[in-house]
Amino acid sequence: MDRRGLMKNAGVAGVLAAGLAPAVHAQAAVRWRLASSFTSSTANLFGAATAFANAVKAMSGGRFDVSVHAGGELMTPLGVVDAVQRGSIEMAHTLTSSFYEKDPAFAIGAGLPFGLDGEQMAAWMQAGNGRKLMNDFYAAYSMVGLEAGNTGMQMSGWYRRPIRSAADFQQLKVRATGGPMDAVMTRLGAVPQPVAVTDLRQALAKRRIDAAEWLGPTDDLALGLPGAVPYYYAPGWWTGGLNMSFLIGQKALAALSAEHKAIVEAAAAQAGAAMRARYDASNAIALKDLAARGVVVQLVPLAVMRAAYAAAKEVYADNNGKSPEWKKIHADYLSFQRGQLHLSRIGGAPTEAFVSKMQP
């Protein structure tokens, strides 16, 4: 071996000894705390947070650890946004429409009555202006948002008595959902009632409320809602699919290396896609289970849909006057929806309707 070769190898050995090999980038361990708004009993919802944390740890080779805390462990489920804003925790996992009272614009990132469905929401967020507009809004709260999965199809919920016209909502005690849904229900004459998700069946059975919606067939079965009241309605006009969010403190995100930032985004996308897939698969099975239990799904009458749609438009018009952020983001949201509806009318919906009729 010549002198030049010896020097070259010695140089490489020195780099390796110093721990500076190009292929090895030692990084300080990162420890984050994630507070979810959901309890561990909500398997699909809370599961997205644990899936995110597991993916981050695996992708980082264990150098980036996210401890996950269910709703109520570190703070109340509605305390997560304030905690991220203060820097008490690095990130939250939540449904942003729960913070509608802070600013109506929070709800747009979660889903609106008669709004985008799950696939359309993903398209608006990732390929339209959705994520940018929402993150411009979240910046006022020192946060950055990433999508954390969508529930897909929704149901209108469980009712003690049939809903034949908009008049049947008068003085109807319905579980409060937070966000624009409560505002729409109030305009229809209903009286939203605060009830914890875990208490829904008991509240219905003991007549504390007359109606309740949660998410869809999978979660309704898990809560034991079948049999509590006789009427089960579809479709879930109050949202085409609830979009969950990971809200990350700006300072915490800025402190990460480029590699770790990429890991956070990839892990969120992976966890969100898996959650949506689980819901689409399990909801179809749950619908069959409900039918086997004798549950008959009723369709919301067209007149009721029209009344609810009109009420939603009134709520949105009010929000335009309350929040400049709502007005700006919602205008883009509606423009995107018009394009998606046209696309569906031309492409997806006719084929889906045909195949549905042809299937035994």
Image (tube, rainbow, N blue to C red):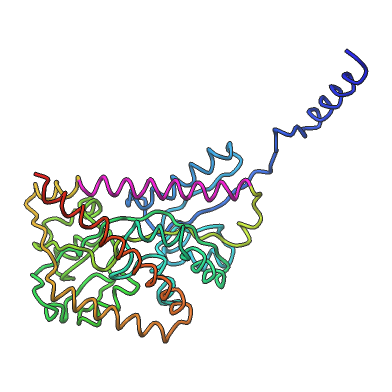
Q: Is residue 278 magenta?
A: yes
Q: Is residue 194 left or right of residue 332?
A: left
Say above or below: 284 vs 313: above
Q: Image quadrant for the N terminus?
A: top right
Q: Nearer the viewer, residue 267 or 221?
A: 267
Q: Residue at point 29% right, 49% down?
A: 279
Q: Is residue 62 left or right of residue 154?
A: right
Q: Most prominent secondary structure in the magenta stretch?
A: helix
Q: Is residue 187 left or right of residue 300?
A: right
Q: Magenta stretch? A: 259-284
Q: Is residue 230 magenta?
A: no
User: How far across and how far down the image is residue 91, in percent?
Assistant: 52, 57
Q: Nearer the viewer, residue 73 or 360?
A: 360
User: How far across and how far down the image is residue 10, in percent?
Assistant: 86, 23
Q: Nearer the viewer, residue 332 or 263?
A: 332
Say above or below: 244 vs 193: above
Say above or below: 269 vs 236: above
Q: Residue at point 44% right, 59% down?
A: 245
As drawn, the residue found furthest toward the front would be 346
User: How far across and how far down the image is residue 345, in percent?
Assistant: 25, 62
Q: Residue at point 47% right, 57% down?
A: 35
As drawn, the residue found furthest toward the right would be 3
Q: Residue at point 60% right, 48% down?
A: 31
Q: Image quadrant for the C terminus?
A: top left
